[in-house]
């Protein structure tokens, strides 16, 4: 037997591995939630965190139904504190650090908060589930 030339380069192998991992990386969560998260991440145009942020942002803009009631579940500075009940009015923008930012109405007026810091409490089933899935993805990205 004689040695043969390599079929793939190391870069080819790395690219193939990245592609496969990006298509299955959220399935470890198990069950339906992992499948839902993976389906949204698979919509990303690329394998970067920013591409995943954009895919989530677009999906949220398409599927969230506003307004809905929520509770702030993460520590916040400013007039809206952890445990506060708010009404989520709309998506305002995508931030590269904090993800999808939403406008919320509360007793002190209207502010903007990261969606991942909220838990939908009075909303249709799809909205509650989508906000929870997004928070799980954001925390584990």
Image (cartoon, helix red, strand yellow):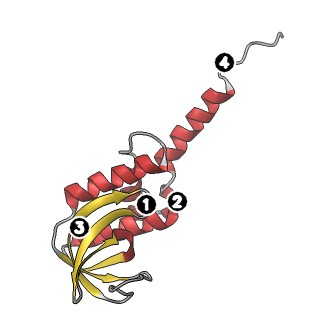
- Callout 2: SS: helix
Q: Secondary structure at mark 3?
A: helix
Along the horizontal axis of the image, is 37 left or right of 28? Answer: left
- SS at badge 4: loop
Q: Is residue 130 above or below residue 68?
A: above
x, y percent for residue 25: 51, 52
Label 3 to label 1: alpha-carbon separation: 15 Å
In this figure, which residue is indicated by the disc labeled 2? 28
On screen, residue 41 versus residue 19, left or right, reads left
In the picture, the disc for residue 34 is: 1
Callouts 2 and 1 close, C-beta under 8 Å: yes
| Residue situated in front as seen by the camera: 139 or 40 | 139
- Residue 71: horizontal and vertical position, in percent? 31, 84
Answer with mark 2 or mark 1, whichever residue precedes in sequence. 2
Residue at horizontal 18%, vertical 73%? 124
Earlier residue among tags 3 and 1: 1
Residue corresponding to mark 4: 7
- Name, please, the residue furthest toward the right: 1
Give the position of the N terminus as an image quadrant: top right
Mark positioned earlier in the residue sequence (3 or 4): 4
Q: Position of residue 117 (x, y in %)?
A: 38, 75
In three-dimensional space, the C-alpha distance between marks 3 and 2, rounded to whole angstroms, equals 22 Å
């Amino acid at each position: 037997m004689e040695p043969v030339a390599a079929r793939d380069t190391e870069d080819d192998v790395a690219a193939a591995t990245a592609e496969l991992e990006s298509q299955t990386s959220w399935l470890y969560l198990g069950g339906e939630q992992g499948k839902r998260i993976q389906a949204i991440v698979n919509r990303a145009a690329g394998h970067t965190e920013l591409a995943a942020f954009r895919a989530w942002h677009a999906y949220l803009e398409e599927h969230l139904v506003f307004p809905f009631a929520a509770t702030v579940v993460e520590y916040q500075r400013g007039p809206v504190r952890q445990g506060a009940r708010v009404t989520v009015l709309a998506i305002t923008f995508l931030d590269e650090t904090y993800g999808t930012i939403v406008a919320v109405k509360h007793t002190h007026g209207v502010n903007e908060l990261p969606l991942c810091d909220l838990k939908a409490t009075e909303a249709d089933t799809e909205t509650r589930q989508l906000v929870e899935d997004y928070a799980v993805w954001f925390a584990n990205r």
